[in-house]
Image (cartoon, rainbow, N blue to C red):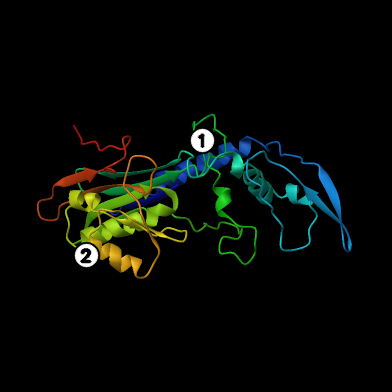
């Protein structure tokens, strides 16, 4: 979970998050070790002897994991972090990632005094780690998948380390007041969406409603840049001159773009506004009654 918060009274908005995290850590430890998969070790003859290997998982995709250093394949399972990584790797092919339901939620809150909170919560994969803590009812994520067992990787395992991820809850301030709070769900599509809408508000002076209805592009990965066909022809041509583009409509399904939401305090009037993703049927905004 990633939380951004801004408080006018200079309080400690992270105190609750720390207390909750402490309780989760205690409760998860009380669960004890979970049963690990024990795949059978097999051998194949190589040019300089026999090579041990294991086959596990039941997905439709074949994934080959070869560590970049000599190792004992059976002892690998005794390392908790690496064991969880291998368990997740074994289930990655169980569903087509492009059609699997997402498990990320973002919400923003603004109170009557202008204090703002932006929260992005994700399970990472469908049902996360599939472990529910009985006291809190919290379904634990499988964020261990963000880490990489390769030592040269920026996301290599380390004590108390935060992995690089795509979640980016944002709170902008203006004239010493909270101005707007924004975030999104949608995996790698989150960063392009949050950056563009933020730019629409800050650099182009759009209203919150106009910014959310403005056509966007998505350059979150792959060989092409996704372009909303509502973009003016000159914009499409300028992009096509530098990148391979793919005209991608903003529709309910599939989610070709991220699903953002935001709240905003109008600096001129002090009015509070909120908006959710304009194409998502399960998004919503609630005003204080």
Q: Which mark is residue 139?
A: 1
The outermost residue toward the left is 269
Query: Mark 2 or 1, which is nearer the eye?
Result: 2
Could you say where residue 3 lies in the image, as x and y percent from the top left?
39, 50
Could you say where residue 228 lies in the image, as x and y percent from the top left?
30, 53
What residue does disc 2 label?
203
In the image, 176 versus 200, the foreground residue is 200
> Is residue 254 left or right of 31 when viewed as pictured?
left
> Is residue 80 left or right of 289 when viewed as pictured?
right
Could you say where residue 271 lies in the image, as x and y percent from the top left?
13, 47
Q: Earlier in the sequence, mark 2 or mark 1?
A: 1
Dot 1 lies on which element? loop
Dot 2 lies on which element? loop
Could you say where residue 190 lies in the image, as x and y percent from the top left?
39, 53
Q: CA distance from mark 2 to mark 1?
A: 39 Å
> Residue 232 lies in what quarter of the image?
bottom left
Q: Which mark is residue 226?
A: none
> Is residue 43 left or right of 27 when viewed as pictured?
right
In the image, 148 versus 117, the foreground residue is 148
At horizontal 40% and vertical 64% (from top left) the residue drawn is 244
């Amino acid at each position: 979970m990633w939380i951004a918060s801004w408080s006018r009274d200079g309080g400690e908005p992270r105190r609750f998050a720390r207390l909750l995290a402490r309780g989760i850590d205690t409760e998860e430890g009380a669960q004890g070790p979970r049963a690990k998969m024990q795949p059978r070790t097999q051998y194949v003859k190589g040019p300089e002897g026999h090579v041990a290997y294991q086959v596990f998982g039941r997905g439709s995709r074949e994934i080959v994991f070869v560590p970049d250093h000599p190792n004992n394949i059976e002892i690998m399972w005794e390392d908790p972090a690496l064991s969880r990584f291998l368990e997740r790797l074994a289930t990655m092919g169980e569903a087509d990632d492009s059609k699997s339901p997402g498990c990320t939620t973002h919400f923003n809150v603004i109170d009557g005094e202008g204090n703002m909170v932006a929260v992005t919560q994700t399970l990472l994969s469908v049902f996360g780690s599939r472990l529910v803590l009985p006291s809190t009812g919290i379904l634990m994520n499988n964020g261990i998948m963000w880490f990489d067992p390769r030592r040269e990787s920026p996301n290599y395992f380390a004590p108390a380390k935060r992995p690089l991820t795509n979640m980016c809850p944002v709170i902008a301030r203006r004239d010493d007041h909270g101005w707007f709070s924004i975030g999104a769900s949608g995996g790698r599509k989150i960063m392009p969406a949050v950056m563009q809408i933020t730019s629409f508000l800050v650099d182009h002076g759009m209203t919150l409603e106009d910014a959310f209805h403005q056509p966007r592009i998505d350059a979150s990965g792959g060989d092409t840049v996704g372009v909303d066909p509502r973009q003016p022809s000159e914009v499409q041509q300028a992009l096509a001159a530098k990148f391979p583009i793919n005209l991608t409509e903003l529709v309910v399904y599939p989610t070709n773009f991220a699903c953002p939401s935001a709240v905003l305090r109008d600096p001129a009037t002090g009015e509070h506004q909120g908006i959710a993703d304009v194409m998502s049927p399960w998004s919503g905004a609630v005003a204080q009654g």
